[in-house]
């Protein structure tokens, strides 16, 4: 498939630039920042004309662009809320069939981790930050554009996607680079997804998230954060990281 990646200069974008071509995809790259040694597109997602030109002719968009941590409401409003709106408007207008949307665990970050059952995606929105709130908006936007205009989206509530787990919390939430590419490939290619929300982590021994939705798309995770457990300090059972899905973001 011909795929536009927004936010392609970022952490996940950098991993996907390496890994998605191995799944058979041809990439067009976009970000606010130039990507050295590439002919990437450089524009702000709030620029509707630039966004429209960027999506023209692709089969799908992997939408990673935006602010990926907590910030002022004004900044989140521009980059994540308006930026995602401009992206969906462009996709609709140019007849692009599919978006893979980088949602986040922080859309449901105040969910308590006290259930004996794995946590699915059929839980209420409980954003833990303005950042998480923008991900609730993004999932709502995807739902609207699927129902009203037939734009298909897989919204992936990503856990913690970094080269290695960075904390004891990430022993549950880690999404390895390889599994991230496998999940995004599944989200790009699964038939008839309408708007589907899935959780996005590796096959972690300590996972509290249910991966059945992602597996239904064809995702077969191959990594487990447990391999890094010896190197990380233990989880304090009284800390937000142990008690709430969004962990320390609830303290921001
Ligand atoms: N890394 C994770 O663990 C994780 C977890 C959950 C969700 N996500 C989501 O996945 C996506 C990618 O995450 P990441 O870790 O690579 O983040 P990142 O911050 O490294 O990358 C985001 C990119 O978006 C670009 N960007 C920001 N504002 C923009 C704008 N107005 N117009 C155009 N581009 C803009 C930035 O320049 C940056 O390169 C983000 O949407 C993030 O919220 C990431
Ligand atoms: O919860 C997490 O670990 C991650 O959640 C993502 O949404 C954020 O973009 C990232 O900065 C966090 O590290």
Image: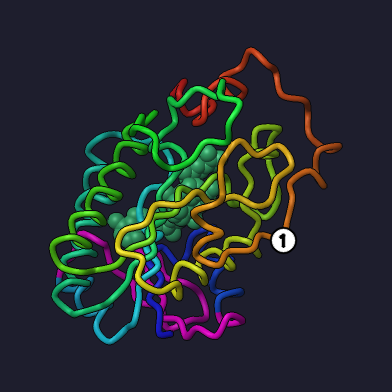
Q: Is residue 33 left or right of 77 when viewed as pictured?
A: right
Q: How is the image coloured?
A: rainbow
- Horizontal and vertical percent position of residue 66: 35, 53
- Residue 28 is covered by the magenta coloring: yes
Q: Nearer the viewer, residue 46 or 63?
A: 63
| Residue with the mark numbered 1 | 222
- Relative to 72, is 27 above or below? below
Quadrant (top left, top right, bottom left, bottom right) of the C terminus: top left
Q: Residue at x 70, y 18 (%)?
A: 236
Q: Is residue 29 left or right of 113 when viewed as pictured?
A: left
- Horizontal and vertical percent position of residue 215: 56, 59
Q: Residue at x 49, y 59 (%)?
A: 10
- Relative to 90, is 196 above or below? above
Q: Which residues are magenta?
A: 21-48
Q: Residue at x 20, y 79 (%)?
A: 95
Tell me where residue 55 sits by quadrant: bottom left
- Horizontal and vertical percent position of residue 78: 22, 48
Q: Is residue 7 left or right of 166 when viewed as pictured?
A: left
- Horizontal and vertical percent position of residue 190: 45, 72
Q: Residues within 10 Å of mark 1 (few under 14, many from 20)?
A: few
Mark 1 CB within 8 Å of ligand 1: no
Q: Name, please, the residue furthest toward the right.
A: 230
Which SS class for mark 1? Answer: loop
């Amino acid at each position: 498939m011909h795929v536009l990646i927004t936010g392609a200069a970022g952490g996940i974008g950098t991993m996907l630039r390496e890994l998605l071509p191995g799944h058979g995809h041809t990439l067009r790259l976009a970000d606010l920042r130039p990507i050295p040694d590439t002919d990437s597109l450089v524009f702000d997602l709030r620029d509707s004309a630039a966004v429209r030109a960027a999506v023209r002719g692709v089969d799908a968009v992997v939408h990673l662009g935006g602010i990926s941590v907590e910030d002022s409401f004004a900044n989140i409003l521009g980059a994540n809320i308006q930026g995602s709106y401009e992206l969906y408007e462009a996709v609709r207008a140019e007849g692009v069939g599919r978006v893979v949307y980088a949602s986040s665990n922080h859309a449901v970050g105040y969910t308590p981790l006290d259930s004996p059952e794995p946590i699915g995606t059929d839980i209420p929105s409980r954003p833990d930050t303005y950042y998480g709130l923008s991900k609730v908006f993004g999932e709502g936007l995807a739902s609207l554009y699927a129902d009203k205009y037939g734009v298909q989206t897989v919204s992936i509530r990503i856990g913690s996607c970094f080269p290695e787990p960075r904390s004891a919390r990430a022993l549950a939430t880690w999404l390895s680079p390889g599994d991230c590419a496998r999940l995004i490939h599944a989200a790009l290619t699964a038939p008839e997804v309408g708007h589907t929300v899935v959780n996005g982590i590796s096959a972690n021994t300590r996972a509290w998230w249910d991966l059945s939705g992602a597996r239904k798309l064809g995702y077969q995770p191959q990594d487990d954060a447990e391999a890094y457990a010896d190197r990380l300090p233990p989880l304090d059972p009284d800390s937000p990281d142990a008690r709430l899905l969004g962990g320390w973001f609830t303290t921001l």
